[in-house]
Image (cartoon, rainbow, N blue to C red):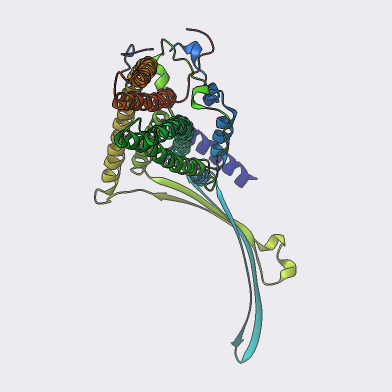
Amino acid sequence: MKTQRYLLRALIILSIIILTSCSQMPQYTRPEVKIPDNWRVAVLTKEDIKKDNWWHEFKDDTLNELVQTGLKHNLDILIASARVEEYMARYGAKRGELFPQINANAVGGRGRTTVLNQPITSNELALNLNVGWEIDLWGRIRSAEESAKAQILSAEEGRNALKLTIISSIIEAYVNLLNLDEQLKITKETVKTRKDYYEIFKLRYESGVISQLELNQAESEYESALASVSDIEKQIVQQENALSILIGKNPHLIMRKNTLMGLGTPKIPSSMPSELLLNRPDIRQAEKDLISSDAQIGVARAAFFPSISLTGAFGWASQDLSNLFNDKTKTWQWTGNVNLPIFKGGILTANLETAEALRKQALLKYQQVIQRAFREVEDALIEHKKVSEKVDILFKQIQTLKDYSQIARLRYENGYTSYLEVLDAERSLFNAEISYTNTKASYIKSIINLYKVLGGQWVVDKDV
């Protein structure tokens, strides 16, 4: 009973010491970051922020399905998920060091010796439980545990950042596909128009109304448009293959019901709090890396102090199996071990300086990631604004060129001008229509990019 009381008192004292030692662990404080009061181009209100399923704002069921498939099957995301599982396992290993380590071993043997020419056969049986526990007086194990925990969160944020990138890439690839569909439609319409002209010109040439030159010009324009169709069809297949890989599938046909012009276009709010950026996955990941490196300083500091371990053994030893668990065969032993570093040739100091240097690097990287985020948002805002202006300009240009093309054809039919004027008008209109659909795609992708650089965290549910 006395032994048990002494052991209980020792455990209570050790518990108090361990709780006190938690104060030895370095406490993390989020560093101050300079945040601009406003954006150069536009800002969002907090009421307009919503995180989940932001891609639904494009109002396309096929797109929603593609994104969901990509989130489940994209191999980069699956690799990132496995990395999170790896860090969770490492955290479990570090956390396990806080608790006593218990092992059991059994030994059995039979031997024969000779004493005074008389053979003696003996049995040896033993069953032992060994308990070892390092007392975390200086927070070494807890600091390592905190570092491992931060690494899990860092890996999780890394996965979130990757998800955001993959989602954006899937949507952009889908927009590119719809853009190519639109270009193919425009080009096929142009092919039909030029083919009709070419057939008419052949009849006129055979009737002697026009020259060989005009016939060749019409034929050349028709063949040029026909070649463009072949090129766009090739790009469509390649884009489908790229999109298939993004969603984690083998290359296949991507079924789509919508058009580029039919996609929803989320509104851009007139204001956004700059603090919104602190929720970007890459910024949160950089901060978790900073927390991890902060905790590693605690591990390096604790190495300067003595480590204290308790070990114990309890078991039975007997020469006869039937008497193995007899009270007389009990064995036990308690020992304490203190390991005090005296001279390490500067290794401990160097390790501490390394941990502090790594922490400094993590802090600077955290600041760098935030600066880069602000630049990316500013770039995305000005890109969206200017591309939006360009869409309006090109739309007006197309209306003007349609009128020009119609007038040029009338002038040619009435003999006031050559066919070269008609060709110039049609080329200009065709190029403007292709440029318009490309710019419209760029406009939608500027919205995607804005969602991406803001961490996918805004949706406008009302007019602003």
List the single residue furthest toward the left: 345
Answer with left or right where residue 362 lies relative to residue 327.
left
393 versus 14 height, above or below: above
Q: Residue at x 28, y 42 (%)?
A: 354
List the single residue furthest toward the top: 464
Q: Residue at x 52, y 26 (%)?
A: 55
Residue 25 in view of the camera: no
* Horizontal and vertical percent position of residue 272: 41, 13
List the single residue furthest toward the right: 322
Q: Nearer the viewer, residue 206 or 186?
A: 206
Q: Nearer the viewer, residue 302 or 207?
A: 207
* Horizontal and vertical percent position of residue 346: 24, 48
Quarter of the view holding residue 450:
top left
Q: Residue at x 47, y 37 (%)?
A: 159
Which image quadrant: the N terminus? Answer: top right
Residue 324 in view of the camera: yes
* Horizontal and vertical percent position of residue 63: 55, 31
Number of residue marks: 0
Q: Nearer the viewer, residue 75 or 358?
A: 75
List the single residue furthest toward the bottom: 117
* Horizontal and vertical percent position of residue 9: 56, 38
